[in-house]
Image (cartoon, helix red, strand yellow):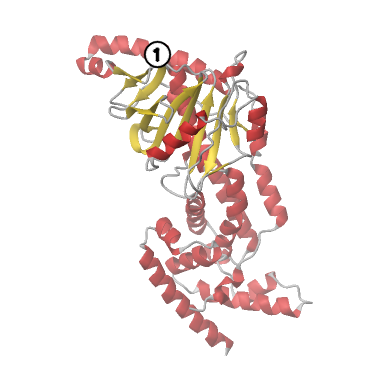
Amino acid sequence: MNDRFLYQLREDPDPEFVRALRGRFPSVSDKAAHPVAPWISGWRLAAASLVALLALSLILFALSPGARALLQSTTVEIAGRVYTILDAYPQGPNLETRETEPEIVTVEDVLAHSPYPIHLPTYAPPGYELRHDHVLKHAPLPHQPQSHVYVFVWRGPENNLSLMTCGACPWEQGEAVAPCAVEEVTLANGQPAVLVRGGWYLNEHRWRPDIVTTLTWRRDNVLYQLLAPSDFPVDELIRMASSTFEAGARQTD
Amino acid sequence: MDAHVRTLRRLLLRSGMEQAQALDWDALFQDELPRVFNFFRYRLADRDAAHDLTAATFERAWRQRHHFDPQRAQPGTWLLGIARNVWREYVRGQEREARRLAPLEAASNQANPPHLVERLVAAEEQARLRALLAQLPEREQELIALKYGAGLTNRQIAALTGLSESNVGTILHRTVRKLRRQWEETHE
């Protein structure tokens, strides 16, 4: 079918228009100057929500057997991490409110300046490449440089993989998960790791097993979490995580 | 439940997945701006109006960027979904007949550097094509704009419009054939 004549209406927008429009949105690198450390609001909200939850639970315990059952969530220990098993979306205002922007830095910046050692995977699944110019750096808590959180991104043909590192996150305390969503796996060197299938979906207030798979492990007291689409092969995630223990793994000074 | 870890996970899900993984704004702006602009350009003779609607689309996308769900759409498809809504509101809103695909004379007058014969001819041809497009039903106009303006594949158009991929292909084939025939008739 000869349809070349239909392409003749294509044009480029005016360069001045493009420049002006681009200027209306903050440059990604400008967001580094965010005046509020991103953890601060989260911690305050967390404290406030704990107090609110405590008060609410006392009221509910007094009023409703159903509410008591809801609050009596169970815990399970997986690979030394304790997870809270919940049937319903975790309640609490701090789940909804935090909205801060990370700084965008390069891999080289992180490797040169991270306050804790980071071992990047030497293996990436075929077709996935580490984005050297796009690491999210979340500001630390005041006087606690180890609480820097970095998120590295591997760009793939159809989706991306994200690796979060945290130098101040306690290994023992896992997050709240849905029943049957968490299991222990073993990395190539025998190191235990935790696989969580799904996540609390903020827009729908429910656990969705089809949005993400998370693999969590630690090395040198640094917590690593690898996030992938839910249909991503788990053995590839394990292989990627295992490669952070290989001798050639890039690390900070 | 530990609030610190919970905050971390939320941060990771929101920042790691939704921002870093799903929506690279700089890349989105650079890659998709010409598509969005041409989506509107194929529907409007008025270049300034196409600029305005392109800007409105990106401003809305910026406000809604945290709601982008990579499981549901590619960034470009998501953005063109917003562009479609902006277009619908524009059409519903005001000056519909005045701005949509202006008649041949008006369009050629807008784009003319009168001293360049080649560009004058090109402008006239574009105006003739716009006039042909203007006669199409709304759905066919939109599919042509998505295919030839925004450069989407039939599969992407299907995902965006809710039509089946084969249906999109059939409609486009029929529409292009009709346009081709009219195009050749007006050349004779």
Q: Position of residue A76 (x, y in %)?
A: 31, 19
Under mark 1, the amino acid is Ala
Q: Residue at left 51%, top 33%?
A: A163
Q: Position of residue B59 (x, y in %)?
A: 58, 45
Q: Position of residue B13 (x, y in %)?
A: 46, 32
Residue closest to the far left: A65
Q: Residue at left 69%, top 53%?
A: A17
In what element is the residue under mark 1? helix
For label 1, count other residues whose C-alpha is less than 10 Å away and answer few (under 14), some (14-19) or many (20+): some
Q: Chain of mark 1?
A: A
Residue closest to the far right: B115
Q: Residue at left 54%, top 45%?
A: B60
Q: Position of residue A227 (x, y in %)?
A: 45, 35
Taking depth in this image into account, of A203 and B92 the one nearest to the observer is A203
Q: Is residue B155 left or right of residue A19?
A: left
Write down the residue under mark 1: A52
Q: Is residue B136 left or right of residue A4?
A: left
* Quarter of the rendering containing residue A68: top left
Q: Is residue B22 left or right of residue A75?
A: right
Taking depth in this image into account, of A83 and B127 the one nearest to the observer is A83
Taking depth in this image into account, of B172 and B154 the one nearest to the observer is B154
Q: Relative to residue A1, is residue A248 depicted above or below?
A: above
Residue A73 appears in the picture as rendered: yes
